[in-house]
Amino acid sequence: MFARFTPEARRTTIRAGLLALDEGRTTLDEDLFLLALAESWPVAGFTVTPEAVRTEIGERRTAESRAGDRELLATLGIDLDEIRRRIPVRRDDPPAWRLRRSRVRPLNVVLVGPVGDLPLTGRARKVVEVAMNWRGSGSRVTDEDLLRGLLADGSNTSVSILRHLGVDLLPLARSLNFLHRSA
């Protein structure tokens, strides 16, 4: 499935997966697609900061607490930098990741990478499906398409986060040509 993704959209999807793993989640949900987009991609009308999104989705860990984790591991004799050096593939290396759909159960989509497999929730799968099908079957998936996928379901967490952060969704959808798709 990743063969159709632009390098940017692929990195965004991988970043969302890494954020899920860093939070200890066992699935990839659409709210982390929103956070990954906020971290990497400024768009007119999409002016939320990653910090605001993190707060909204409940991630309140600061850089200090992450440094504390490093110190805790060091007290156990674990050198985090050494572990990262010994891992044969960097965890954020795009060629090491795949987006796989089950042939037997086509509604099951899994982000597969060097640090683990993450099944996409139904809402995250919808983000990917809308992004892949927005322009037709032969087109490349872009970050804009991923944002369209987030906006496609008004009841998802990402839309409520954007609303709570004061994003006017109508102009954002118009800037993405989401409301008036040309045939």
Image (cartoon, rainbow, N blue to C red):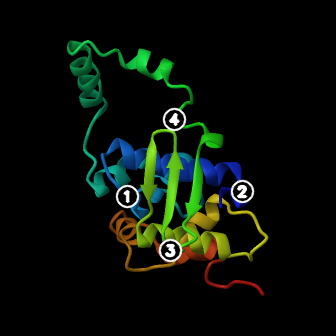
Q: Nearer the viewer, mark 3 or mark 2?
A: 3
Q: Position of residue 9 (x, y in %)?
A: 63, 54
- Sequence-wise, the earlier of marks 1 and 4 is 1
Name which residue type carries label 4.
Answer: Arg
* Disc 3 to disc 4, C-alpha distance: 27 Å
Q: Secondary structure at mark 4?
A: loop
Task: Kindly tell me whether residue 92 is visible in this rendering.
Answer: yes
Q: Position of residue 147 (x, y in %)?
A: 55, 65
* Disc 3 to disc 2, C-alpha distance: 20 Å
Q: Is residue 109 left or right of residue 29?
A: right
Q: Position of residue 125 (x, y in %)?
A: 49, 69
Q: Secondary structure at mark 2?
A: helix
Q: Nearer the viewer, mark 3 or mark 4?
A: 3
Name which residue type carries label 3.
Answer: Arg
* Disc 1 to disc 2, C-alpha distance: 22 Å
Q: Position of residue 94 (x, y in %)?
A: 62, 42
Q: How many residues crowd around disc 1 within 10 Å: few (fewer than 14), some, or many (20 or more)?
A: some
Name which residue type carries label 2.
Answer: Ala
Q: Mark 4 — residue?
A: 91
Q: Secondary structure at mark 3?
A: loop
- Sequence-wise, the earlier of marks 4 and 2 is 2
Evaluate if marks 1 and 4 touch, with contact meaning CB atoms under 8 Å apart. no
Q: Mark 1 — residue?
A: 27
Report the quarter where the C terminus lies.
bottom right
Does residue 164 sit above or below 70 in this rendering? below
* Disc 1 to disc 4, C-alpha distance: 17 Å
Q: Residue at x 48, y 74 (%)?
A: 169
Task: Kindly tell me whether residue 48 is visible in this rendering.
Answer: no
Does residue 23 sit above or below 110 in this rendering? above
Evaluate if marks 4 and 2 touch, with contact meaning CB atoms under 8 Å apart. no
Numbered badge on residue 3: 2
Q: Secondary structure at mark 1?
A: loop
